[in-house]
Image (spheres, rainbow, N blue to C red):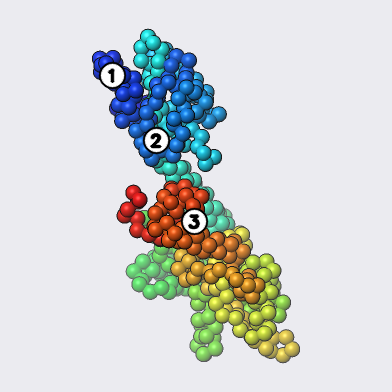
Amino acid sequence: MEHTPANENFGPLLQPAALGDLEASIAVKVLAAGGDVAIVIDRDGVICDLAVGNSDLQLDDFESWVNKPWSDTVTQDSRPKVEEMLRDAASDKAIRWRELNHPSRRGDSVALRYVAVGTGDDGRIIAIGRDHRAASVLQQRLLQAQQSMERDYARMRTSESRYRMLFQSTSEAVLIIDGSTRRVAEANPAADRLIGGDGSLVGKPFSRLFAVQNQEDAASLLSVAQASTSRSAPQTSLTSNGRQLNVSASLFRQDRSMHFLVRLVPAERSEPIAVDGSHRMLASINLLPDGLVVTDRDLNILTQNSAFLDLVHLPTPEQANGEALTRFLGRPGVDRNILLENLVKYGVVRNFPTVLQTQFGELEDVEVCAVSVPEGEEGFYGFSIRRVSRREMERGQQPLELVRSPADMSELVGRVSLKEIVRDTTDFVERLCIEAALDLTGNNRASAAEILGVSRQSLYSKLHRFGIGNFDDDAQ
């Protein structure tokens, strides 16, 4: 980014009255004190003198610049800028800061921001440069933050589209009621077919959707839902278009406004509430937060609870029944083989780390417990699937020990991804080398960086990363 700071004016420094009778070399050193480097260039663009005011610059061959064209000290992409700056300085155009890149011995480049001004009739030009690395780092961080925000925005839009599709495609009749006006804000096609029929539910008062004798009960249902402190949604029986409906309502907030989620189920489809122990057990299992799945010996899904449907983003049980569990669970090939082998051998698998893939291709880290249940000649498998946040996994992970034999490797393969094995093993070896270098050099970081063949900046970054040493004395 190139601009002319309003508060940076080097004109007075270059006036003869300001410099007096100082020699050129001394004047250049004075100017370098205001920047990081000052260069005197003759009318042919050749450097005739320079001074460095910042010893931390990673360019250690400044002396070789003298008697070289200024354009030969920069990278190929910066040479047109040098020519333009020399022309502007010679013609007394407005001062403008430009960013130039200088090659370094490490093979990369170092960015400096320059301003060039003419000194008078002799045709000489003085260029003052400032280290631009800190600003470049800030710009890079800003760019990364912007890209991260754009990715998050795209992810939010994708999620909104998916939930919109689920809302429209579910077979359950659902209404969204505005909390302030008590009017229908949204209605899915199933609700329109059940109580509307003409696609005109949006905007109607909620209580007017039902028979006259039930309108007061409908309004009361929303009031009870708003005042309720229970997690269970209050429900009541209402009549609409001559059909008896079981209606439940729950309160939620979105964008600082209050809404009601209303579900409508025809009374003839409602099941009686189970009171015996087995039905209570089944009802409790269906409400558990962990996904529960029962499969046959070929891992085809026989039945599942609501939490599993939520995990894989399927709206109805019918869309899951008959599907292979491996379509959603585990990495292809590896996890299925390990699960089956352990289930057959031991009859149970506990806390098996793997991934879950939704029907939209999203991946989530999960832990699986599984059991083999013999029944007749075949039997079946039961799976409990628990979502594990990435932060919990990282907190619970222990660093991998250095692999020393094929037996060690066989214990890791299948349990840990190849990428993680390589990354953690590399970190382990890198940390050992750094600690050994610091020990050999008496904790002299400059010497340690030299024997490791890395820059001091790179070494400091790794020290921070691995938590090695005391960072209060970075001047070492």
Residue at far right of view: 377
- Residue 86: image quadrant is top left
Q: CA distance from mark 1 to mark 2?
A: 26 Å
Residue at far top of view: 121
Which residue is denoted by mark 3 in the rendering? 186
Taking 284 as reference, is 124 left or right?
Answer: left
- Across and down, in percent, residue 311 comes to 55, 67
Taking 420 as reference, is 323 left or right?
Answer: right
Figure label count: 3
Q: CA distance from mark 1 to mark 3?
A: 81 Å
Tell me the kind of residue under disc 3. Glu
Which residue is denoted by mark 1 in the rendering? 22
Tell me the kind of residue under disc 1. Leu
Q: Residues within 10 Å of mark 1 (few under 14, many from 20)?
A: few
The correct choice, above or below, for 140 with respect to 312 in the image is above
Q: CA distance from mark 3 to mark 2?
A: 58 Å
As rendered, which of 305 and 474 lies closer to the eye? 474
